[in-house]
Amino acid sequence: ALNLKGKKVAVLGAGNVALDCLRSLVRLGASEVKMVCRKPRDEVTGYQWEVDLAEEEGVTVCDSQMFKEIIVKDGKITGVKTIKTDYKGYDEKGRIQIEEVPGTEQIQDTDVVVWATGQGADLSFLPQDGSIGTTKSGGIETNSELMTTLAGVFAAGDGRLGVTTYVVDAISEGHKSARSIDRYLRGEKGVKERRKFPVAELTVEEVNEKIAYGQFSPDKRIFLRNLPIEERISSFKEV
């Protein structure tokens, strides 16, 4: 394991991967751990409940701060230069709208920088004639069979969606595209889609009736209890 005892660490990003990094760095002995992110705290992509836990464990949230430069002196990292941001949400094309606030630059003292700013699909390999369409989210356009706008070419997973999802979802799309390709090549002899279980849709009256008969509970979701902070920040035990 890395020896970060006494080190100041800045993590650039505020998604769930960044939060995993932040909480792991605390457990690796860093003396100071900062989350540097360009959005306001309540708008970050990571789970808010995990941001709360990270703060409980000693992480400092430096929100609305855009990363500008890594400060290096004598071959060693000494800080991260940031500038305050004005977050305005997303436009009609799904593009984030953030403006820098002039004159608000500051230096975040740090010894180590961890990049956790997210990933996107590199679609530069696609035909330049536009025969394979793309989406606003930066993915590849497909139909319900996962075939692209170019007949016979299929796409699946994060590359198709343009955003990072769970591994199991990407695997599922890989299986689905394989079945779709088989049907495309073999027609009716191709592998059929698996039967999907019906989704139960209930009216408010039906829900209230089931609550009255004890079949449903109106109780709110119960959050799992966590280990005491002193115990969980000193080990990698399941919290």
Image (tube, rainbow, N blue to C red):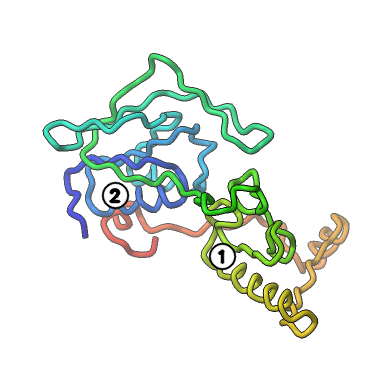
Q: Earlier in the sequence, mark 1 or mark 2?
A: 2
Camera-nearest residue between 30 and 80: 80
Is 32 left, or right, of 122 in this rendering? left
Q: Residue 230 appears at what percent x and percent y?
A: 29, 53
Q: Amino acid at mark 1?
A: Ala
Q: Which mark is residue 83?
A: none
Q: Is residue 105 above or below residue 66?
A: above
Residue that appears at 24% across and 36% down: 110
Q: Which is nearer the eye, 142 or 54? A: 142
Identity, as a three-letter code, of the amino acid under mark 2: Val
Q: Which residue lies most toward the left here?
A: 74
SS under mark 1: helix
Is residue 54 rendered to the left or right of residue 177? left
Q: Quadrant of the C terminus?
A: bottom left
Reading the image, the residue beneath label 2 is 26
Give the x, y percent position of residue 3: 17, 53
Along the viewing direction, whichever of 120 and 190 lies nearer the viewer: 190
- Residue at 56% x, 70% y is 171
Cα distance in 3D space between marks 1 and 2: 31 Å
Mark 1 sits on what residue?
170
The mark tally for this picture is: 2
Q: Quadrant of the N terminus?
A: bottom left
**Is residue 33 placed above or below 142 in the rendered structure?**
above
Residue pushed farthest bottom? 189
- Residue 131 in picture, x, y percent from top left: 67, 52
In terms of image quadrants, where is residue 51? top left
Category of crowding for the residue at label 2, using alpha-carbon neighbours closer than 10 angstroms: few (below 14), some (14–19), many (at least 20): many
